[in-house]
Image (cartoon, rainbow, N blue to C red):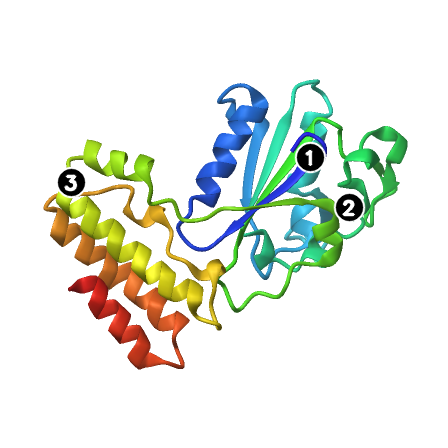
Amino acid sequence: MAYKQNLILQGPPGVGKTFVAKRLAYTLLGARDESRIETIQFHQSYAYEDFMQGLRPDGAGNFYLRNGVFYEFCKRAGQSDQPFVFIIDEINRGNLSRIFGELFQLMESDKRGPAHAITLTYSEERFFVPANVYLIGTMNTADRSLALVDYALRRRFAFIELAPAFGVKFQALLEKEGLSTEFIHILVNKLEFINKVIHNDRNLGSGYLIGHSYFTHPQMPEKEWFLRIIRLEIAPLLREYWFDEPDQAEEQIQRLLA
């Protein structure tokens, strides 16, 4: 990440994208220092005025200039030589061109610092992204309602794909939490089977797999806990995946519940 300074963690639901982003931030900082981390979440109403700078009503019929969260973050980072990490959860939910505006060029690692400062849209102030700022975004690859990521953003970010991990470490975690070895094997076999079905479906694929984080906080009794997650979280997701093939959805749900 050091060479690019901008990273997006992408993957299907439940692979721990936000969890990994926070741990990666701690690694970059060299400490669990929340004062040097800012976390926000993009949505369809999020705008440049929220992110950078904009005019806001003051309640008396006038407008004032208010700085956005990224502007304030960069100002804090510019007063320090230590690394700062800005995390954007669900980065592909926002209108990226509208949110970033002229910042696209400033996000590049070789365009950091005062030598590349530009004038902002709402003020005459010259602004730059400090060299010690790192950006980490997360992106859900299974949300059909979202448009493809802006190519201007793709060129400025490195991308890492996170996948479901039902291997040795996951199984050791469940065993440590008190689940029986036999039940862990049943759980893993069921989830690996449904993920194979999803992966081989020409309308879905690897971006729609079921992640391990749905099952990282087990409760007892183990069977009831597992069935509750399937009914309340996984089943609605599968019905959405196969919205045009309800028989397929119900077949796979019943296989998980069996």
Amino acid on which disc 2 is placed: Leu
Q: Earlier in the sequence, mark 2 or mark 3?
A: 2
* Label 1 CA crowd tier, 10 Å (few <14, some 14–19, many 20+): many
Which of marks 3 and 1 precedes in the sequence? 1
What x and y, as percent, mark residue 10?
Answer: 54, 50
Quarter assignment of residue 180:
top left
Residue drawn at x 46%, y 55% is 12
Residue placed under numbered mark 1 in the picture: 5
Q: Report the front residue among 125 and 57.
A: 125
- Closer to viewer: mark 1 or mark 3: 3
Image quadrant containing the C terminus: bottom left
Pair 2/3: label in front? 3
Q: Which residue is mark 3?
A: 181
Identify which residue is drawn at 40% across, 48% down.
164
Identify the residue at image location x=59%, y=56%: 92
Q: Label 2 belongs to which residue?
A: 103
Q: Label 3 crowding class (10 Å Cα cut-off): few <14, some 14-19, many 20+?
A: few
* Horizontal relation, residue 179 to residue 54: left or right: left
- Type of the residue with mark 3: Thr
The quarter holding residue 28 reads top right
Q: Give SS at disc 3.
A: helix
Q: N-terminal of the two: label 1 or label 2?
A: 1
Given residues 185 and 240, the one toward you in this image is 185
Determine which of the numbered discs, if any, sits on residue 95 in the image. none
Say if 214 sits above or below 203 in the image.
above
